[in-house]
Amino acid sequence: MKNVNYSTPEFEKAYTYTGADLGAVWSEKETRFRVWAPTAETVTLNLYESGTAGTEDLLEKISMQPDVNGTWIAVKPGNLNHVYYTYSVTIDGKEKEACDPYAKACGVNGRRAMVLNLEETNPAGWENDKDPHATDRMTDAVLYELHVRDLSVDPASQIENKGKFLGLAEIGTKTPSGHPTGLDYIKELGITHLHLLPSFDYGSVDEANLSVPQFNWGYDPVNYNVPEGSYATDPYHGEVRVREMKQMIKTLHENGISVVMDVVYNHVHDAESFCFNVLVPGYFSRINANGIYSNGSFCGNDTASERSMVKKFIVDSVSYWADEYHIDGFRFDLAGLLDTETINALIAEVEKKHPNVIFYGEGWTMPTEVTKEGYLMATQLNSDKTPKFAYFSDTIRDGLRGSVLREEETGYVTDNFEVTEQIKKCLLGQADWCKSPSQTVNYASCHDNNTLLDRISINMPNASFEEKVARNRLAAAIYMLSQGVPFLHAGEEILRTKVDEKGNFVENSYASSDRVNAIKWKTLDEKMYQDTLAYYKGLIQFRKAHEELRYATAEEVDANAKFMETPVASVIALQVKNTLMVFNPSMKAVEIELTEGTWDVCVNAKKAGTECIETIETGKVTVDAISAMVLVNKSL
Ligand code: CA
C-alpha cells in the first residue's frame, strides 16, 4: 500500500473506527487486543515477560485477524495482568515493531506496553475521590504551574521522594529551619489548581539511568496515556507509575487542590519512531506532498489533528485521563496547532461525565501545514470558535514585563508607560483578541522565558533588590486582581531565579540542571522572601474574597467596572463595585482623590490580604511609588 492518501473522504469513510476498545482490554479470563493499522499486510501481537525492550523473553507471537475499519484483533485466554506486549506490522513487505498507542501502562522507557488490571492501581477510597473545586467557575481558579521534580529535589525541601510523584503526596515536610515545603507550602499559598508540567511518558529522560540526575520539562511525548516513568519509584514495573500518580492526585484532592495536566498532543518526541506512525506510516503527523514534515511546533513535527483517527485518539486520551486519573483540567501545549473541531469535540466528550474539568492552552498562531482544507486552528484569534477553552494572555504578560521575544523591551512595571492602555484592557479581561474573562489566563511568568524577577533584573540591572521586588509585587497585584484566570509560575511568589554556574540568567531551562531549576527552599529563611510570599498569599485571599474580581462575562465586567481619573497618566485607578484598585508604576508617590465614604486599605506596598491595614476617611490617599493599593468601601 504505497503512497496512501490518508486525507481523502474515501479513506476516512472506510477506515474510521469509532469503537471504545482500542488497546488491550483486560479481564481475569481473557485479554482482548484491537489495533488500528489499515495499511498493514499482517499484524502480529508479541507477548513478553518483561517491559525492557531488547530483552529476549518473548512468551508468544499471535497473528491478529483483520476486523472492521482497518482494525486488527486478537483474544488471548487466561489472566494476562502484567504481561508486556508490542505489535509487529508488515507494510510493503517490511516488518516493524511498535508499542501500542493506546497503551495504559508500559515498561522502562515506554517501548513495550503492559496489560494491566487498572483496578489494582487504585488507592484506597479512590471511588470517593473528587475534584475539590468541582462547583467553581473558571474565573474562580488560581492556577499554579509546577514541574514535578522542581518541588522536591532541593535537599532543603526535606521531602523523601525527591523528584517523584510521591514527593507531592508528602505531608508535614519542612525546611531545616521549620518553614513548610512541598504540599503543605502549596496548600498554605491558597491556590486552587496545581498545573503539572508534562507528566505523561516522555522521551528525554532515560528511565534506565535514574541514578544520574537528569532533568527535562518533558515536551516530547512517547506514550500519551501512561505516566512518566522517571517520576515513579520504579519505572520497570508498569503498574507502579500508575499507582503512584493516582496516589499523588488523591492526596492533592484531599488537601483541597485540583490537578491540571499539561498535555502535548501537538507534536511527538520523534515522528519516525512514534508508535502510531510506525503502525500507520506518517498518519499521525502533517507531512506535505514532498514528504516534508510540517514544523509549526519547531519540534520537528506537527500532529494531524484534522484526521479522523488522530482526532479520536486525542479525544479518547483526554477522556481517559479525566476518567481513570481524575484529572481536573488540561493545559494544551501549542493548542494553535490543533483544529478547533478537535478541541470542541474533546471538551464535549469530557463534559459528559466531568462538567468540572477546565481547559486552557497556548493559542499562538503557528506556521503549520494542515493536511485537509477547511480547518481553523485553536488560536487566540479564533477564541470565539472555542467558547469553553481559555487562552494564555501574552498581552498582559508582555504588557507587564516587556515582550519575551525582545529582551531589551520593558513593560508597565519596568517604566514603559506606553502600554498603560493595554494594561487597562487586561485589567478588564478584555485583550483585543478576546472579550471573555472566562477565556483569558492572566500571568507574568511561566516555565518558558526568564522568571519575573530575572526579567526585571535584566531590564533594570542598577535597581536595588528592594526596588526589583517592589516591581515584581506590582506585576503580581495587576494580574492577580485582573478579570480572568490568574496563573503563577511556581516560585514566582518567592522570587524564583534561574541562574547558571557562571551567573547568567537562563531563559530556556528545559534541559538545565537541578541547580538552575529547583525551587530553593532555603530562601524562605530570608525576610524579603517571606514578606513576598505573604504578599502573594494576601493577593490570592483578597481575590477569593471578592467575587467582583471574578466575573465570568464581559457584560458583567462592563456593568460594574469604571476607571477613575488619576493625577498622572501612567497611574491606573479602577473601581469595580466597592473595590478600588490603584496601580502606581512611577518612581513618585501619588495622591488619589476618593469618592465619599470610609475606605479600608487591604493592599498597599508592604502588605496584602483581606484585613483592613488602615481606614481612610479624609477623601484622599497616598499611593507609594512602584506599588499597588486596594481599598474597599464597606458603605457602598
Ligand atoms: Ca519516559
Image: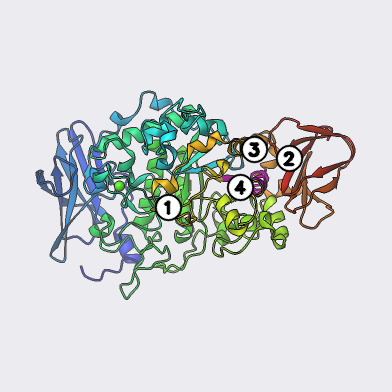
Judge depth for marks 1 and 3 and give the one in front.
Answer: 1
The residue singled out by tag 1 in the image is 501
The type of residue carrying mark 4 is Ser
Q: What element does badge 2 sit on?
A: loop
Q: What element does badge 1 sit on?
A: loop
The residue singled out by tag 2 in the image is 604
Residue 86 showing in the rendered view: yes
Q: In which quarter of the image is the C terminus?
A: top right
Q: Which of 97 and 570 is in front in this view?
A: 570
The residue singled out by tag 3 in the image is 535
Task: Estimate the x, y position of residue 291 in percent, counting from the top left.
Answer: 30, 72
The CA distance from mark 2 to mark 4 is 27 Å
The residue singled out by tag 4 in the image is 438
Q: Residue at x 50, y 26 (%)?
A: 178
The CA distance from mark 4 to mark 3 is 25 Å
The CA distance from mark 2 to mark 1 is 37 Å
Residue 492's tag is: none
The type of residue carrying mark 1 is Glu
Q: Give the range drawn in magenta.
A: 470-487
Q: Which residue is drawn at 39% across and 54% down?
A: 265
403 over 614 or under it: above or below = below
Which residue in the rendered view is the most extreme toward the bottom? Answer: 290
The type of residue carrying mark 2 is Asn
The answer to whether 10 appears left or right of 174 in the picture is left
Task: Estimate the x, y position of residue 247 in percent, counting from the top left.
Answer: 37, 30
Neighbours of disc 4 within 10 Å: few (<14), some (14-19), many (20+):
many
The answer to whether 409 appears left or right of 205 in the picture is right
64 over 179 or under it: above or below = below
